[in-house]
Every structure is written in C-alpha cells, then in structure tokens.
Amino acid sequence: MDFPTEIVHEGKVKILVPKLRAFVKTPSEYAPSKAPVFYNPLMELNRDIAVLALQTYQKTVNRKIVVCEPLAGCGVRGIRFASEVEGVKKVLINDINEKAFQLAKANVQMNKLNKRVIVKNEDANRLLSRYGAPRKRFDAIDIDPFGSPVPYLDSAIRALRDGGLIALTATDMAPLCGVYPKACIRKYGGKPLRTEYCHELALRLLAGCLAATAAKYDIGINVVFSHSTNHYIRLYAEIAYGAKKADESLKNMGYILHCFNCFHRETLKTPSLIGHSGRCSECNLKLDYAGPLWLGKVTDKKFCELMKNKVENMVFKQKEKIHKILTLIKNEVDAPITYYVIDRICDKFGFPVPSVKKVIETLKTKSLRATQPHFNPKGIRTDASARSMNKILQKLSQTDYDKF
C-alpha cells in the first residue's frame, strides 16, 4: 500500500487497515473519512452483531448461503462473515475505490479465504443489478454505507432471493431525527420529528422506506431485528416475493402523532392523515406528526432469542455489552410503540427526576406494562397515558421530596 497501515484483530480475523492517526491533523477531525480507505474501529460492535444475525439467519434457513457486501472498504465485514459464520458458501465483497479493492484483496489472502471470498472493484448498484435474475440472487446482502443506504435499496432488493436477508445501516441521523426534515422526506419518504424517541422514529422511517421500495417489485418485508447504537441505526429484514406479501407489509405503514405540550402520542394506521382532527385528546392543543413510517414490529422475538443464545459461542470483545443490548431489545418487543424519557417530562414540569427503576415498579403496581428500551437508559415503554405518566412522576418526586 502507498499509505501507512497497521494490522488489527477483530473477531477471528486479522485485517490490514489504514493507520488512522496518520491522517488526522486536528483532534476534531473524523479520522475514517480522512484515510484513503474507509475503516471505522468504533463499528466493531455493529460488525459483531451483523455476524451474530447472519449466523442466526443461516441456522433458520438451514442451508449454505451466499452473501454480498457491496460497500466493503477494507473488507473486514465480509471476511468476518466467511471466517466466523458457519454455512457461508461464498462472500462477494466490492468497493468502487481502487485502493480499497487492493487492500481487501490483501486481507482476503492474509486470512487464506481466496476460495470463498470474491473481491470486486465497481459501482455498488451496477454490481447488484447483475445479480437480479433468478438463480443468481444472493441469500443475504449487507449494506453499510457512510450516510444513507437508500441509494442502494432498489438494486439490493432485486438481487435478493425469496426469503433473503437484507441488513441496512444508516448513519445520517440528523435528517432521520428531525434536524433536517426536508432531507429526510426526500430520502426516506416520511416526515421525522425531533422528539425524545427520535431514534425509534428513525428506525421506523428506514423500515417504512424499505417496505415501500420493496412493494414496487411485489415484495413484502418482515423486520427480524433492529438496534440503535451510538451514531447509527441498524435494520435486518427478510423479504418475501408476492403482491399479497407486499400488500400485507404496507398495512404496517402509518403515522405517529405527538403533542409537544403534554407528551401524548398516538399511532394511526392509515394511508393519510385526512379525517383526523389534529388535536391532542388530552390537552386539545395541536398535534405534530411523523410519517408515513413502519408501525409493525421492529424485532422478531424468536429471532432475537436465537441471537441471544448464540452470543456465548462467538468470538466478540464486547460480549457482555451485546448480551445486555439483546436482553433489553427482547424485553421491549411486545411493548407499546414509542417510549417516555422521564428526564424530559420532569424538566418540562419542574419535577425532581426519580429513578427509572422506581417509575417502572410504580407502573407495574398499577397493572400497567413497563420496560426499559435499549434506545435510552432514561426511557420507559409503557401503555400508561401521558397524563398518567405526568401524575406518577409528580407523585414520586413529591414523595422523594417529603422524605428529604
């Protein structure tokens, strides 16, 4: 290579990567974007969970699988798939960057995977479009871009076999979380909201975009797993061919309406907002909305349980953290859509902030569902109304004040 490199170990493999500190001039610079080949060490957790999810999918379908990573960078993700996931027959990795192509080839050779990992150097959409014909399609496609995965959705969906798995990463959180709503509408076809649960909305906007794109080709989706970690969201979905499957998927589309005054929120599974009063049912002030977006499940409980059972058998540095994430996600699968963040409510109404544990215990004594979401450690998923939550937090804060 004509640039500084170093060898790192990740999972079961060793990878030659750019020496990131050699490309940073000031502490504020984002090192991975400065290097000639993209590699982000902070995304190791993302790749660990990707390996875990792919292994779970392979065991579920119970056959040899062929995988494609069209935006490979140095090739670490695809190489890990070939090395760590049982039942992977072939992995095709690709990058349009010539230096990334050369580095990925070197890494494949270093890990002695030449017979099972194919490296290509072309445009991602062009590559995927060549695998759109029956019997050429992939079992799984992992799209991990710098930014939005939307430009690759059409070609990726068409390059997946019936029952195939698509994995998507989105790092453009500013549009998805409502900082740049016009950009989100352009890319994802839905309006975002800057709410305390905006990361969940981001996941649902991405899932909704995937469902709408797949439906154009008479394909339905089933979201089997998703998570929000650090600066990105991640989504895994199986696809199913057929117009009826597409129609069933689209039934999960709708809107989330939110009151910024009292924190009331509600869902609306309709093609449009026509006919809704636009007023909050609790305080009668004007509601804002997010959508259209996905209102169905964003994780399949059985798939998540299978992932959790396989963690101990995998070679991960952050095994404990992954186990905690999976436990939280499994517990919130059947809980209501959206969550309250107690800090936000207490700040709004001037209450002292009680512990999350105490609030959950109080909700359960009132026969209400309550669980902590993986999105936010101060969050609570519950079927309690906003008015009930406000009263409970007020009472708890008053009790704590009296004790003090």
Image (cartoon, helix red, strand yellow):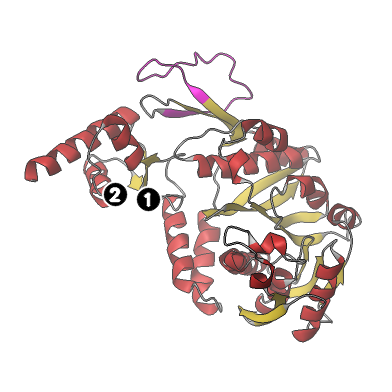
Q: What residue does disc 2 label?
A: 356
The boundaries of the magenta stretch are: 265-288
Asked if one can make out residue 52 in the rendered structure from this viewpoint, the answer is: no
Identified by mark 2, the residue type is Val
Residue lying at 73% horizontally and 66% vertically, measured from the top left: 35
Prevailing secondary structure class for the magenta stretch in the rendered image: loop
Residue lying at 52% horizontally and 44% vertically, measured from the top left: 199
**Which is nearer the eye, 370 or 401?**
401
Asked if residue 121 lies left or right of residue 81, the reply is: right
**Magenta-drawn stretch contains 271:** yes
User: Residue 379: x, y in percent?
Assistant: 38, 46
Asked if residue 39 lies left or right of residue 337, the reply is: right
For the image, the number of numbered tags is 2
Specify which label sits upstream in the sequence, 2 or 1: 2
Q: Secondary structure at mark 2?
A: helix
Residue lying at 35% horizontally and 18% vertically, measured from the top left: 283
Q: Secondary structure at mark 1?
A: loop
Q: Quick check: 322 above or below 316?
A: above
Q: What residue does disc 1 label?
A: 372
Asked if one can make out residue 157 in the rendered structure from this viewpoint, the answer is: yes
CB contact under 8 Å: marks 2 and 1: yes
**Which is nearer the eye, 41 or 221?**
41
**Magenta-drawn stretch contains 214:** no
Residue 389 appears in which quarter of the rendering? Answer: top left
User: Residue 298: x, y in percent?
Assistant: 55, 47
User: Residue 254: x, y in percent?
Assistant: 59, 30
Q: Which mark is residue 46?
A: none
Q: Quick check: 399 above or below 160?
A: above
**Which is nearer the eye, 378 or 277?**
378
Q: Quick check: 211 above or below 238?
A: above
Label 2: how many Cα within 10 Å (few below 14, some 14–19, many 20+): some
